[in-house]
């Protein structure tokens, strides 16, 4: 792929941060809208769960296609196209009033999210390569910050009396403004046509490790509150406290991650991250009740830089073109989020929810054991 040298490296870094910020912001704006969408459509929880699969399906379908297009045309048009579509579809989610329209809107929203997700990581790998130093953890931290801003901002707008549609119009305006600032600073790159390909070799390993890390995030999000309330660590009203602790710790870890990667290297970050995450699960599941909730902080800190390091490794390997490799890592990672909660539920039926979480701790030990293999690649 022919890549002209960037005229403004700092501008390219700013554009990448804005892309991650927009993706996290718009995605999180949807969360406070879910109860309103459910009420408008007049559906039960089970039907809503099936509809929400449309979002994941749209993302997973769009990701490998985005990787191939980014390899051919560069990540810039994919970031802008995916980001603009994501922002414009948000108001549609605020007015869709039937299962069919809501499913279509979620499918498109998911496809747009999958597009910008892959493209911004492809762009981040190139910006990091040109800078000659780790940057990926900081970029992913902006995604987390965008998530806080999106969920908090939309909640504040709704609490202030704005309708869901009016709130989404405000959010869309913020997202489009950020994309307009980013657009002229994104790197332009063109390459040769690259076909879709199934991950192989080290790329398959990276994708499986990413799926494991995403599985941990999904498990904390979907099952963490049930775990701690079922164990009697907190009351029902405080069930979400664990995920809050986890999210803050992950953001802090990612903000400090680039410096840690520079000092420690890929192998030590992956090895230590897996061990710390497993220790966090152990503290949560077997520690004294007075400090067990601190296990969420250890899980967040340990897992915080695993995915960014895996994306950087996907961009450096030579088994497959980097955009295709990053698309594969992202796609299987999302598959971990989609299939993981259901898998945790099935495991919980057989061995109990604590037993299912002990299984996650074991999987994170496997991440540590694969650290040297990833570093060599």
Image (cartoon, grey):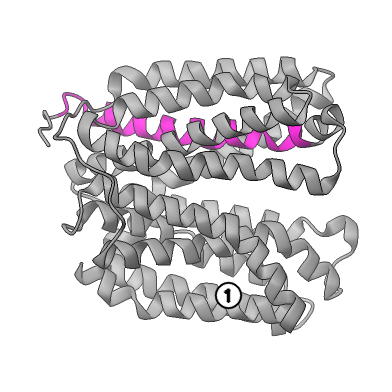
Work out whether 231 lies above or below 146: below
Q: Is residue 20 magenta?
A: yes
Query: Where residue 305 appears, x then y in whole percent?
Result: 43, 59
Residue of label 1: 360
The tally of labels here is 1
Q: Position of residue 84 (x, y in %)?
A: 47, 20
Secondary element at image label 1: helix
Q: Residue at x 73, y 14 (%)?
A: 166
Task: Look at the image and tell me in which quarter the C terminus lies.
Answer: bottom left
Crowding at mark 1 (Cα within 10 Å: few <14, some 14-19, many 20+): many
Q: Nearer the viewer, residue 11 or 200?
A: 200
Magenta part of the chain: 6-34
Q: Say whether residue 63 is left or right of residue 150.
A: left
> What residue is rendered at 15% in x and 33% in y?
191
Which of the two residues, 254 or 205, is positioned nearer the viewer here?
205
Seen at 72% across and 63% down, the residue is 223
Left or right position of 179 against 214: left
Q: Is residue 89 above or below residue 28?
A: above
Q: Main secondary structure of the magenta part?
A: helix
The residue shown at (68%, 42%) is: 52
């Amino acid at each position: 792929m022919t890549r002209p040298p960037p005229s403004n490296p700092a501008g390219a870094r700013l554009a990448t941060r804005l892309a991650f910020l927009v993706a996290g912001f718009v995605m999180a704006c949807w969360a406070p809208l879910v109860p309103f969408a459910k009420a408008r459509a007049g559906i039960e929880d089970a039907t809503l769960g099936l509809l929400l699969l449309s979002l994941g399906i749209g993302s997973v379908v769009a990701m490998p296609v985005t990787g191939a297009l980014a390899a051919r045309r560069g990540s810039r048009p994919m970031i802008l196209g995916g980001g603009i579509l994501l922002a414009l579809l948000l108001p549609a989610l605020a007015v869709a009033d039937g299962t069919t329209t809501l499913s279509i809107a979620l499918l498109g929203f998911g496809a747009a999210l999958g597009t910008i997700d892959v493209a911004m990581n492809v762009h981040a790998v190139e910006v990091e390569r040109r800078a000659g130093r780790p940057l990926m953890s900081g970029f992913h931290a902006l995604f987390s910050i965008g998530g806080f801003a999106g969920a908090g901002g939309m909640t504040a707008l709704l609490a202030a009396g704005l309708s869901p549609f009016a709130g989404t119009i405000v959010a869309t305006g913020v997202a489009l403004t950020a994309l307009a600032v980013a657009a002229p600073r994104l790197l332009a790159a063109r390459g040769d046509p690259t076909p879709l390909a199934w991950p192989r070799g080290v790329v398959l390993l990276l994708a499986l490790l990413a799926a494991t890390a995403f599985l941990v995030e999904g498990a904390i999000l979907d099952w963490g509150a049930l775990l701690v309330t079922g164990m009697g660590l907190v009351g029902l009203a405080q069930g979400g406290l664990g995920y809050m602790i986890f999210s803050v710790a992950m953001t802090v870890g990612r903000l400090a991650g680039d410096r840690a990667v520079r000092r420690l290297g890929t192998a030590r970050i992956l090895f230590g991250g897996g061990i710390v995450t497993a220790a966090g699960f152990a503290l949560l599941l077997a520690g004294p009740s007075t400090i067990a909730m601190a296990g969420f902080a250890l899980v967040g800190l340990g897992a915080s830089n695993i995915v960014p390091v895996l994306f950087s490794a996907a961009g450096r390997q030579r088994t497959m073109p980097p955009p295709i490799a990053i698309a594969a890592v992202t796609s299987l990672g999302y598959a971990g989020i989609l299939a993981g909660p259901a898998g945790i539920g099935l495991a919980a039926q057989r061995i109990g929810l604590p037993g299912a979480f002990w299984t996650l701790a074991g999987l994170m030990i496997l991440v540590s054991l694969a650290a040297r293999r990833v570093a060599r690649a």
